[in-house]
Each structure stands twice: as structure tokens, then as C-alpha cells.
Image (tube, rainbow, N blue to C red):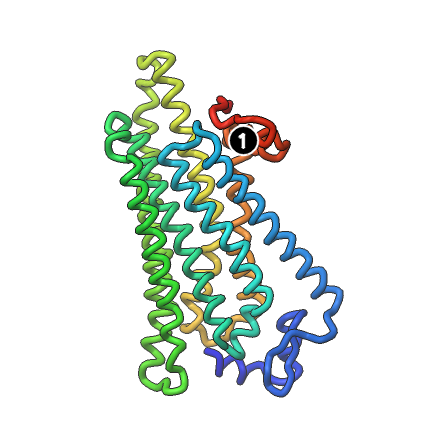
Amino acid sequence: MESDVSTNRSGDAVTDLHPCYEIDHYSYKFTTKPSAICVMLYVFLTLLSLITVCGNLLVIISIMYFKQLLTPTNYLILSLAVADVLVGILVFPFSMAFSLSSCFYHEDLFCKIRSSFDVSLSTCSIMNLCCISLDRYYAVCQPLTYKSKINQNVVFSMIVASWGISTLIGIGVIIPGLHKEECKDECFIDVLMANTVGPILSFYLPVVIMLCIYLKIFLAARRQAHIIHSMGKCGAAASKMERKATKTLAIVLGAFLFCWTPFFLCITFLPFSNEPVPLPVIETLNWLALFNSMLNPFIYSFFYSRFRSAFKMIISGKILRGNLANSILH
């Protein structure tokens, strides 16, 4: 793929692929004279990184500090927030220093590390979302057995499995690039693994599973709707709370799909395309995908009144002036 790009775009034609990079003796380097567009782009990306880190730290602190938020579902949300924080701390800086465009031309060790973090953390996010969908399924469809089936040990096992699988997949994306120099017949295998098998295992399959689970939840919620009045006020309130939590987490899933699906579709069909996809398009889709890590805290604060109350207490500094861990969040 790299040779195709180099063949189709050479010399000065390449310099317009990224506003912050230039060609110097066939090497793709950060420009010594950044343009206004380049400066604005990196200021924007830096702010995006800071907002991503700060927003998800609010989620992490809220869940760890307020005892009311220590629930199985929120432990999974905590794991998701940790992955998003690492995106802001690790992936954003690496993506700014070693852009996707530059790595297409010269994939050194740091480009491989960048790709590994990118794949690991995105896979971890979707694995956590998959676990959250299972949690919501038992909470809504099997409420009587929910607490016995989804306990802290089960949730801990889910989180360990999510991070373990994600780490293995992240390491796996580096392996195809280790023997490019002797690349002949095995090139097709490498492309197949990186652009087809990898996305299927880390994205498409979990997405299909989650969509099926949420469809079951939706159908079960509709069946429960006509009997909710016979449950009394307490049952109705509990059911309403579970449906609202499920709706919020479904929106989190929808935001993830909106941000990540274009990128995965692009890299999946890239090897089969006769015309190379313009690098600015791939670069934009990559940043749209990373933008997802910033969205989740805003979704929680907008739809979850408890998270909103916790965020206000943390930002105002109230938790520093007294022990509010047992506070009732509304």
C-alpha cells in the first residue's frame, strides 16, 4: 500500500497531503515553517486532547469517589473512561507527532507504536461497550436474576478479558510490518490480517453482537410496557430508571459507531480499491474516530443526572472541603 501511494503521489504533489508535513529528500518530515492552518490544527487537536483527558477524569473520579456510583454498570463505564483517558494521553500526542499521512510513507518504530495504541484502545472501547450491552440485557430482560449473574467478580472478569484481548490485537497489528523487506507472497496474508481479519474481530463482530443485544432489549422493553402499570409506583420507577440507563448507554454506542464505522470501512476496503483513497480523507476519518473519546463524558452529563451532579461537585471543589462520598446524587 505504501508503494502505491508513493507511486501515485510524488514530489511536490505530496506536500499538500498534510498542512504540517513536507517532503525532504524522499522523507516525510514535520515542516520547519508551519503555516497558520498547521498551527490552528495543532492548537485544536491539543485542546481536544485536554478536553478528552479532563472529561474522562471527571467520570473516573466520580465513580471512584461517590459510593452511590459504585455499581456493576459503572465499573464498566469506568473501564471505558480509562481507555478514553489513555487515548487523550497517548494516542493524541503520537498521532500529532507521527501523523497517519507521514506513517504511510515511512513507518518507523514510533508509527508502529502509534498504530498499536490506536488499535488496542479502540478495541478496548468496543469490548467494554460489548460488556455494557450484556449488563443492560440482564438488567432489563432478566431483572430478577441480574444481581446474581452480574456481580463484581463477573464484571472484573469482563474488564480483564476486554483489556487482555485488546492488548493482544494491538500487538498483532505490529507483526505484519516486521518483515516488509522480505515481503513477497506473505504480503497478501499481512494485508488480509491487518485490513480484513483484524477489523472483523475487533470491530464488526462485536458491533453485530451489540446491535443484536440492544434489539432484544428493545423488544423486551416493549413487551414490558403494557404490564408496567400493574407493578406499582416502586416497580415503575425501577423499570424507568433501567430503561433510561439503557437508553443513555445505547446513545454511547451510537456515538461510537458514528465516529468509528467510516474509518473501519475505509481501511477494510482500501486494499481492494483501484483508486487510492486520498490521505487527507483517511486522516480526517482517523481524527473523527479519536474524537469519540471526548464525547462520552458529555453524553453522561447530559443524560445522567447523577453524573451531572457528581461533575458539579468535583468542578466546584466541594469534595475537597468535606467528605461527600456518601452524598445522595439526584
Depth check, front residue: 78 or 273: 78
Place residue 71 in its image quadrant: top left
Q: Is residue 122 above or below residue 219?
A: below
Counting the numbered discs, the total is 1
The location of residue 243, given as percent across then percent down, is 39, 29
The location of residue 21, given as percent across then percent down, is 65, 74
Q: Which residue is mark 1?
A: 310
In the image, taking residue 277 as reference, residue 204 lies left or right, namely left
**Residue at (58%, 81%) from the top-left corner?**
9
The location of residue 276, given as percent across then percent down, is 50, 74
In the image, taking residue 174 as reference, residue 110 lies left or right, namely right
User: Would residue 312 be seen by someone viewing this image from the given angle?
Assistant: no
Q: Is residue 134 above or below residue 108?
A: above
Residue type at numbered disc 1: Ala
**Residue at (32%, 54%) from the top-left corner?**
205
**Residue at (33%, 62%) from the top-left corner?**
168
Q: Is residue 79 above or below residue 2?
A: above
**Residue at (40%, 86%) from the top-left corner?**
181
User: Would residue 253 be seen by someone viewing this image from the given angle?
Assistant: yes
Q: Is residue 210 above or below residue 230?
A: below
Place residue 178 in its image quadrant: bottom left
Depth check, front residue: 218 or 197: 197
Q: Secondary structure at mark 1?
A: helix
Other residues around mark 1 within 10 Å, as few (<14) / some (14–19) / many (≥20): many
